Amino acid sequence: MTDMSAASQIYQSALSIIEGVEPRIAAATRQELADQRGSLKLIASENYASLPVLMTMGTWLSDKYAEGTVGHRFYAGCQNIDTVEAVAAEHARELFGAEYAYVQPHSGIDANLTAYWAILAHRVETPALAEFGVKQVNDLSEADWETLRKRFGEQRMLGMSLDAGGHLTHGFRPNISGKMFHQRSYGTDPTTQLLDYDALAAQAREFKPLIIVAGYSAYPRRINFAKVAEIAHEVGATFMVDMAHFAGLVAGKVFTGDEDPVPHADVVTTTTHKSLRGPRGGMILAKQEYAADIDRGCPLVLGGPLGHVIAAKAVALAEARTQAFRDYAQHVADNAHSLAEGFLRRGANLVTGGTDNHLVLLDVTSFGLTGRQAESALLDAGIVTNRNAVPADPNGAWYTSGIRLGTPALTTRGFGADEFDRVAGLIVDVLNATTPTATATGAPGRAKYTLAAEVADRTKAASAEMLDRFPLYPSLQL
Ligand code: PLP
């Protein structure tokens, strides 16, 4: 059992030492804790890592360069980073039942980029080595590359559309993946707003992608990965799943069987800081045949591994292997269900009519608001959410018509089904008390609004009462 009063002393001392060097950083760090403690955090992609995870990041493991892989580094003296990386990878493999784990990616974007290059290497470069009679990629001549570029110039990717809940890194233009791949997206059924597997299969047969990506940032439902794998393999595509959002539910065995991506996908990427509740970072799990190509992630795509963060991943993964984490993951899903039921009972509209994962997508058009107005009004009342497009969003990706809400963070604080039902009530009250401000022409604007002050105050008081009952890092007297 960790002595948490010791943790309190450690952080007090650390902050006063930092204060002596750059007081503004110490002050911002203290303030961030106060802000996090005092807000109702419903951002679906955020969480609160444990103190052991946070502490593991604050060490001299950060000082070591260790480009390469375990036992095969381009720098001398990497034996301790080797230990750290091997332990993290071992936990990842055992927790998720994966054949291979690569724990170096610095973020989710890095994990996806590394995975894409590895898949391309596996699908394109490796066969080319034999064809062109060379031993390694660097030996391919410019003429060989010219031939390869022609053949694979249209590297095709099929990913979930943004307004159905997909992510920018799944082949969209603002991200490098949209420049690497010729992308088409699959959406959801216009009536049910659910993933339409038959439509996806038809699109895959016609488009013949090199990669099919499943996974999402804002789709409030589970995916049958066995079905998508069947489609991918029928059309000769590599099947990649980005489980950044729901990795905690996979780790916690809430998603099992066909809903567990690891046995079905060729490559699975994730972040480690969302529902998985680890340090900010990324990770790749894969079938063994991809290992050698993924291992080239550093230096192909990534810089030197972050030893201190990989160490914290190992600690978080060790935590995720406990029964306590499984209970947590189940509570995350149960609480999302309670939040959704709370909205539906109060007459609000939800994309897909509910949830069976960790997030809820509230369509705010019935309140006469845009997502941007709703997000800002909720923030004024102390509720932190983020606006999000809904399928076929009439307000576009900037103003949007939705609010995305997730349960991982407040579940970590201890919120249960009753509290989440109450949160739904507070949100509905705030949105009912928010009115769009008319533009010069008298039409409702898409950004400005007014929120009744007494409702904002009442909401803040109700939130404060709940937050006090479930303190964040209760053992830290800071
Ligand atoms: N993939 C998905 C599905 C995500 O939701 C996110 C983050 O929002 C990412 C990748 C990128 O993660 P990061 O911010 O760590 O780069």
Image (cartoon, rainbow, N blue to C red):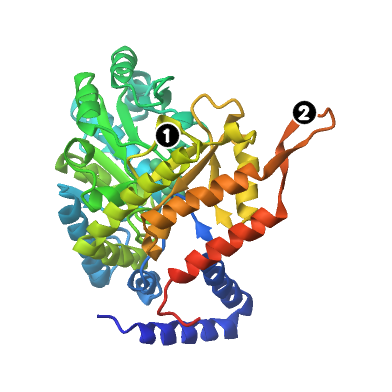
What residue sits right under mark 2 in the picture?
443
What residue sits right under mark 1 in the picture?
166
Q: Is residue 266 visible?
A: no
Q: Residue at x 50, y 36 (%)?
A: 347
Where 77 sits versus 135, above or below?
Answer: below
The N terminus, quarter of image: bottom left
Residue closer to the observer: 303 or 193: 193
Identify the image quadrant of residue 243. Answer: top left
Q: Is residue 25 left or right of residue 268?
A: right
Q: Residue at x 57, y 36 (%)?
A: 364
The three-letter code of the residue at mark 2 reads: Ala
Mark 2, secondary structure of its residue? loop
Could you tell me residue 162's position as x and y percent?
A: 47, 31
Mark 1 surroundings within 10 Å by alpha-carbon count, few (fewer than 14), some (14 through 19), many (20 or more): many
Could you tell me residue 148's position as x and y percent?
A: 33, 24
Mark nearer the N terminus (2 vs 1): 1
Could you tell me residue 176's position as x and y percent?
A: 47, 37
Mark 1, secondary structure of its residue? loop
Identify the image quadrant of residue 38. Answer: bottom right
The three-letter code of the residue at mark 1 reads: Gly
Q: Residue at x 42, y 59 (%)?
A: 410
Identify the image quadrant of residue 433. Answer: top right
How far is the residue under mark 2 from the one under mark 1? 32 Å
Where 449 sits versus 61, above or below?
Answer: above
Residue closer to the observer: 141 or 421: 421
Q: Residue at x 22, y 51 (%)?
A: 101
Q: Is residue 227 left or right of residue 113?
A: left
| Mark 1 within 8 Å of ligand 1, using the beta carbon | yes
